[in-house]
Amino acid sequence: MSQYNIEEEIEEIAGGEFEREPVPSSKLKSWKSFLGMYAGEHAAGTEFVIGPLFLTTGVSAFDLIIGLLLGNLLAVLSWRFLTAEIAVKYRLTLYYQLEKIVGKKLVIGYNLANGILFCFLAGAMITVSATAVGIPFNMEMPKLTDTMPNGITWIVIVLAIGAVISIIAAKGYETVSKAANFMAPIIVLAFLASGIVALRDLDVHSFSDFWNIWGEGSEPFPGQIKYTFWHVAIWSWFANAAMHVGMSDLSVFRFAKKASSGWTTAAGMYVGHYMAWIAAALLYAVYLKSPEAQATLASGSAPTVAPGPLAYNALGIFGAIAVVLAGWTTANPTIYRAGLAFQAIIPKTSTFWVTIIAGSVATLAGLFPAFAMKLLDFVALYGFILAPMGAIIVFEHFYGKKANIIIDYAEKMNVKFNRAVFWAWAISFGLCYFVSITFDVFLSFMTLPAWLLCGGLFLLLSKKQAKAV
């Protein structure tokens, strides 16, 4: 059988996405595919929420601008030297690689949590796009304190957007990548233009004027906590913790020709997270000067953060369209990842249909504005829950042989539930979450300790487990 026929057979078995086989060499992609995807995914509709939310925390200019520089650099380094490095060696999805270590029964629970959390995140992006689509219909925009749908117009718009995004995601990685490459330049231009227009409206003529927008910071808005330099740096590092230190993007970088493709994440971090967050914060700063926002603040409430109207007020119809596209390019790969998680639980079901299921869950989540309006808190929680499991893969890859543990324990020993993994995750998660709640420690500050503790405990417990064999 020729190599071409072998690869065609593998693709047919794997449903076209190689869920339980290494990606064959003929399907590998250059760094350009990842550049567009990451630039589009992280210059996203949610950035229109995150940027303004930083303002509501009373952050200072130094803490925001320099904190984001550091935090995003740490994220890029995590992708390049951890995620991409491991992905190109094994070329497996996170879910299948994890199954080989932890066992089928244990990975089911993880995959379910992973898929659902990704769906909720994608739902927040659908919410963001809906605020733009609703403008022509004079739709009432969700408030920061809203949790439930506020009307039939909102419901219809969210359902329509969710249906389109789900179908695109279900077409597979090739379609997701093409959509991202097509839309990314438009979205980046919109964020840049928004920032420029906001600077004009704020009467900024020098760097000192720009710096003084935040100045030494202020008191946080009602219901928000005060952010310092380390809040900004650590939160921005772990905003995508599940994807880099949590190893979710093994599923993406398994298609990369070289590990150096991991550097393309810088396009997402600095064009997207850095520039886009600051541009969105500037838009919100303009809105805060309006009589409506001042009246809301005077009443003791935080002014509404509605991405669609913010962009529309700055750029007109182009701004509103950019918000819709930004939501799409982020929700597409997120739903794609969720679909892979669900597919690992029900492997006999086609990738197309499990992705449609994931898209449906995301659409239902998008009906509830709380996922978008509390995005800083949700992103911190979702990274904290998922990231420690990625430490299992990282610590086995880099330290497994030195620690004399059995590599791919569940597969080699034919077990379905690796107790060493379960207790490593449960102890690290439980202890660090207890510290966060009991001592009121910012949850993102506990993500790295939980990750390191989980990896260390995994090695210790696995070594003990190996001796008992």
Image (spheres, helix red, strand yellow):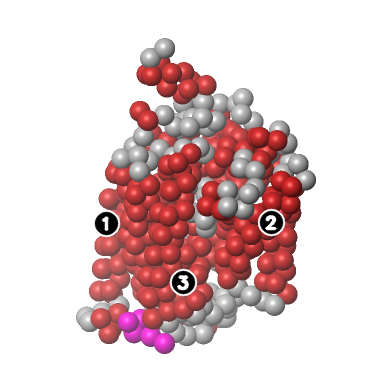
Compared with 67, 113 (above or below) is: above
Mark 1 highlights which residue?
189
User: Relative to 242, is 435 on the left or the right?
Assistant: right
Q: What secondary structure is marked by label 2?
A: helix
- Where is residue 119? Give x, y as percent: 57, 46
Residue bearing the label numbered 3: 233
Q: How dense is the environment of label 3, judged by Cα within 10 Å: few (below 14), some, or many (20 and up)? A: many
- Name the residue type under label 2: Leu
**Where the C terminus falls, by quadrant?**
top right
- Mark 1: amino acid: Leu
Q: Earlier in the sequence, mark 2 or mark 1?
A: 1
Where residue 364 appears, as percent x and y from the top left, is 60, 45
Residue beneath disc 2? 460
The answer to the question of whether label 2 and label 3 lie on touching residues, with beta carbons closer than 8 A, is: no
Query: For the magenta stretch, what is the residue range?
Result: 211-216
Q: Is residue 380 magenta?
A: no
Of labels 1 and 3, earlier in sequence is 1
Secondary structure type for disc 3:
helix
* Label located before the other in sequence (2 or 3): 3
Do the numbered discs 1 and 3 sit on residues whose CB atoms are within 8 Å?
no
Between 349 and 409, the one nearer to me in the picture: 409
Q: Is residue 434 above or below residue 354?
A: below
Q: Main secondary structure of the magenta part?
A: loop
Question: What element does badge 1 sit on?
Answer: helix
- Say what amino acid the circle numbered 3 marks: Ala
Task: Please tell me whether mark 2 or mark 1 is closer to you in this view.
Answer: 2
Q: CA distance from mark 2 to mark 3?
A: 31 Å
